[in-house]
Amino acid sequence: MLKCRDVVNTADQLLDGDMNHRQLLAIKMHLLMCSHCRRYVRQLRTLLRAIPFMYKKASDTEVSKVMEHVHSHRDNYP
């Protein structure tokens, strides 16, 4: 029987579909009984799906401002 720690440590493999049948069965059995781990896996799945939408590409103006700032402070450091 898996412990919650085991599920947390292998949740990424579960979501990637990178498990053998025995591991998958063990995790599914644990998830049937453990609402905390079901919630954890659901939240991890949601987070992984949301990451590509969290950041937009920087505009040319934003890149220029950052680079100007970097160049203006570069001389202050050895």
Image (spheres, rainbow, N blue to C red):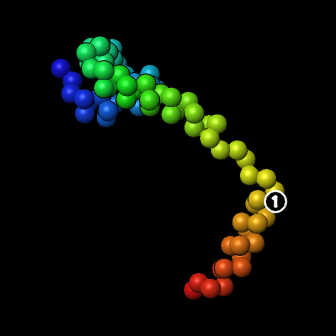
User: Which residue is nearer to you in this view: 33 or 29?
Assistant: 33
In the rendered structure, the answer to whether residue 47 lies left or right of residue 30 reads right
Q: Is residue 61 above or below residue 37?
A: below
Q: Residue reaching furthest left?
A: 1
Q: Is residue 2 above or below residue 8?
A: above
Please tell me which residue is depicted at 65% across the width and 44% down the height of the picture: 55
In the rendered structure, the answer to whether residue 26 lies left or right of residue 54 reads left
User: Which residue is nearer to you in this view: 11 or 41?
Assistant: 41
- Residue type at mark 1? Thr
Please tell me which residue is depicted at 32% across the width and 25% down the height of the picture: 37
Residue 1 lies in what quarter of the image?
A: top left
The residue where tag 1 is placed is 61
Where does the image place residue 41, in percent across and percent down from the top left?
39, 26
Please tell me which residue is depicted at 76% across the width and 59% down the height of the picture: 62
Number of residues whose C-alpha sits closer than 10 Å to that of mark 1, classed few (under 14), some (14–19) or many (20 or more): few
Please tell me which residue is depicted at 70% across the width and 44% down the height of the picture: 56
Where does the image place residue 34, in percent across and percent down from the top left?
27, 20
